[in-house]
Each structure stands twice: as structure tokens, then as C-alpha cells.
Amino acid sequence: MEDDCRPLLGPDPTGDSPSHRGSAGSLDIRTKRPFYVEPRNIVSNDPQERISAEAAILNSRVHYYSRLTGSSDTMLSPPNHVIPTPEEMYVYSPLGMAFKVPDSEQAAKNPSIVTIFAIWNTMMGTSILSIPWGIKQAGFTLGIIILIFTGLLMLYCCYIVIKSPKAIRGVDTSSWEFPDVCRFYFGKLGQWSSLVFSMVSLVGAMVVYWVLMSNFLYNTGQFIYNHAHNVSTSDSEYGTNGSDRVICPYPKTHPGRNDSMTSLCSSSSGNDSSGSSFDHYWSKTGTIPLYLIILLLPLLCFRSASFFARFTFFGTISVIYLIVLVTIKASRLGFHLEFHWFDPSKFYVPEFRLFFPQLTGVLTLAFFIHNCIITLMKSNKNQENNVRDLSLAYLLVGGTYMYVGVLIFAAFPSPPLSKDCIEPNFLDNFPSSDVMVFVARVCLLFQMITVYPLLGYLVRVQIMGQLFGNHYPGFIHILVLNILIVGAGVLMAMFYPNIGSIIRFSGAICGLALVFLLPTLVHMFSLREQGRLTWQSVLFHSFLIVLGVANLMAQFFM
């Protein structure tokens, strides 16, 4: 009697029956039991629908036959061709009801608009702060061309990554990520290569976060101290006047030369020479990076990062506020543009500069989402729209970068300041006393404090999972890993706080492997197995690999 009342799709106590081993959301279609109720056999559309007598008899017959065989015998189970799709599947109740089967996978699917903005939110990181600097390094006209061209290349390589698991025939790749695809084609070498370069992008992002958090915390403390003590100070002796003041922290005596090393001088800019006790203990490159250890190292040691995942919406808020801030500043400052195509002037940079690889390195990381795009697109409700949604997401991301980069560059007041004064973090071109910029720094600081443990968790999961087969092998293992990561961030924040250079090197290194090399090789191997590889395809994809190598090599000569 108890068995007759148990739903046919319910869990099997023994766990051995293949008929009950899965659920409606299972990937194995043979687990989609029990007997299918055709819609014509459902009498009404109530939440609990009455079924016809014919359907009830058929269900009882299948239920009876299933009791004649062992639980492991699927001979009398309905064949696969009568198993419906999840949205058409119903489950019988002994009380004569047919219940709609909820599909766990379908319930978690997102519409296209949500998927597009999820990709946008994931890609919108710290790189947005360096886009104006990158455009300045390349030149205004060349910078816009490179931004569009790099975005299209990154989109194409991302498209290759998305379709790579589906191109493998005879293997269930529904749960695969790109490292699994690399392992399929290149063995352990491919898997470890994708893992190592993925770690480069994550650790590089964590180093940039530490530098920026030191910057934001310093300026936030400076703002609060000055207002509390009614201190009116000038962040720089070289800047504009008025309510919307713009500063040049490191004025240059030789306009037009490369300033990727300029922020090495920032070790002294954050340490005021006035000799006050506050300036002694509140130093941007002396003490602030060490203070952050007290807060962030314990957070990295949390076993789970689910608590911090609740605050990821701050990333969207911060980016939207940055866009509003840029719009207001540009409307107040106006546009200051003059076109000097190749020769520099006192206040303007040429439209085409030889330092453009610095922008390509930054953009490679700015458009980088290739190591997690398969996971993001799996949650898309309409899988047939993946290519369209990915293209729209890249268009939105590229438009955001273009908007911020062009407005900041165009609105930068030249004269009296030179365009070469645009910093790798464009917020550094505004004084710490600016209230709107202060709010932006506070929002970004809180966002990074919550995101930093998430990045550390991703690094831990991938490294510890590969080395020990366990995401949390022990507290000592986790502590040693976290100390190494934090140490890298502290050293860079104290001795080389140039986020532009850190971003461009990280982007060029991980981009070479995860954007240009592995995806193109996977694509060519797949085409060869299908007999569709042509010399034009080999030539084009080999050119992409050459671009990735050239992008990395050029960073060392800038």
C-alpha cells in the first residue's frame, strides 16, 4: 500500500533503480520516467489536473508490469521515443491527478536580457578606469580604432570557445568547461595550460584590486581627515581652478614620451612631506597596503565565499555611478580637442602613437571573459540565441568603454593641462576633496573588498582542486596560498602601483593563451576532424596567434 502511494518519480530508497536515479532535470533521458500523460488525456487545466480513465488505466498497467521485474530491469520501461520534453511531462498520482513536472534546469534559466547584462556586469571590472589612459597612449583616433578592432577579435574568439564543446561528437559535453575541451584535444598539457593562464588573469586582477583599494582607502581617509579638521589643501600644485578641479599628479617636462613608469613616483606622492603624524601613518604606498592585510587576509581564509556573493550587485551600482560621474564631469568641463596627427604639441598628443600596444594589452583583459563564458551561457533560456546575445553583450561592453574613455579624454582640460597628464586610474586626476569622486571611491572600495575574497576563492578552488583533489585540504594550505597572493598585492602596491601596466601585462599574458592560442587551435583541430579545414582558415587563425604573441612581446618594449 505504501508503494502504491509513492509517486513514481520520487526517490528510490535503495538508490539502485535506474528509473528513479534522476529527476526531470537530469541530463540522462532514460531517467525521465514514469509513464507519459498525453495532453489530450488531461481533462482540465487546474494546478492539479484530473486525468481521463484511459490514461489512468494505461498508467496502472505500466505500474503493474514494473512490479513483475527486478528494480534494475528496464525491459518494461517506456522506450525513449515516448519520453517527452520536460515542459510536456506529467507525473501520475494514485489519487487520479496528473502533476506538471518542474524542470530544475529550466527553472534556473535566464532570459536573454538577463544573460546580456550578466556578461556585461562580469566584464566591467577595474579595466574601465584605465581606458582613458590607454586611449591617450595610443592616440585619440588610433585608440578608437583599436578599441573596436580588439573588441571584434575578442568576440570572435569567445564565440569559438562557446561552440567548442558542441563540436565534439560522440561524447557528452553538456557539463564541460573550456579546460575540459583543451584536455580532450591536447591532453593534460592543454588542461594545465588553460588552468595556469586562467590563474594569471585572476591573480593579476587581485593585484590590481590591492593597488586600487590602497588608493581608494588613502583618498577616503584623506577626505575625512581634511573635512574633520577643516584642512584646505591642494593635492597638486599643478591643476585647474574652479569647482570641478582637475589635477596632474605627475606633471611632465617632456610631453609626448611614454609615461607607463610614471607612477613609480607615486611612492612619494602618497607620503606628504609636511611631517604630521597623520601623514606618517596614512601613507598611500607605505602603510595603507599593510593595513589592508588585517582586513582581507582573514576574509580570504573563509571556507565558503557565498556570503560575499550577495554583494556582487555593488559592481553594477559602481559602474552605473561611474558613467553618471563621467557624464556630469564632461558636461561641466566641456570638450578640449585638437587633432595633431603625428607630431605632439604642448597640450595635446598625436592621433597615432607608437605606444598603442599598451592599449591592446589593457583591452585584452577588459574584454576577457573566455574562461567563464560557457558557464554564463548555459543559463541562457534560449540557447539558439547564444551568438546574438553574446554579440549584444560585447556591443554593450564596448560601448561602455568607448563612452567612458572618449568622454574623459575629450573633457580633460587642455590647456592648461596636457593630455599626457591622464593617469592609469582616471580618478587620480581629481582631488581627494571632490565629493562626487569621493563617493565613487567609497563605492568602488566596498565593492572590491567584497569581490576580492570571491577571486581568492576561485583561485583556491582551481589550484587546490588540481593539486589535492579537495577545495579546502586544510587551513595551513589555504593560509600559505593566501599569504602568497596577498604578498604579491602588497609588494606591487608599495613599489609599483601602476594599474595600467599591471593590467596590460596580465591581459597580454592570459590573452595569448586563453584568447588567441588555445581557442584557435581547438577550432582548427575540430575543423580537421570534420574534414572542413581549409588553407584560408589555417591562415586566418594562425594570424590570430601571431597577433597574440606580438601583443605580449610589445608590452616589454613600452
Image: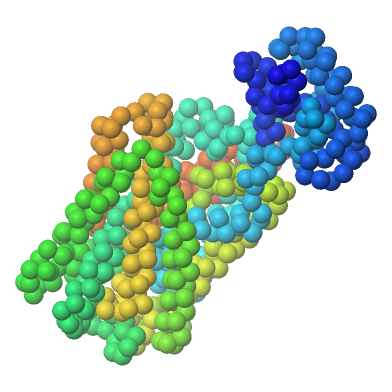
Residue 378: horizontal and vertical position, in percent? Answer: 62, 44
Res 365 seen here: no
The residue positioned 83% from the left and 31% from the top of the image is 96
Can you say whether 67 is above or below 400 in the image?
Answer: above
Q: Position of residue 397 (x, y in %)?
A: 54, 63
x 55%, y 55%: residue:
119
> Which colour assignment does the render follow?
rainbow
Q: Where is residue 405 drawn, in percent x and y?
A: 46, 72
The answer to whether residue 399 is visible is yes
Q: Which residue lies most toward the bottom here? A: 242
Q: What is the total number of numbered labels drawn onto the structure image?
A: 0
In which quarter of the view is residue 503 placed?
A: bottom left
Position of the N terminus by quadrant: top right
Location of residue 259 by image quarter? bottom left
Can you say whether 542 is above or below 127 in the image?
Answer: above
Q: Name the residue located 73 percent from the left edge and 9 percent from the top edge.
A: 70
* Quadrant in which residue 168 is drawn: top right
Q: Nearer the viewer, residue 63 or 31?
A: 63
Q: Is residue 64 left or right of residue 493?
A: right
Name the residue at 81% across, 19% down.
63
Quadrant where the C terminus sits is bottom left
Is 305 above or below relative to 367?
above
Q: Report the side of 396 relative to 510 (left or right).
A: right
- Expressed as whole percent of the image width and height from the top left, the position of residue 439 reads 35, 72
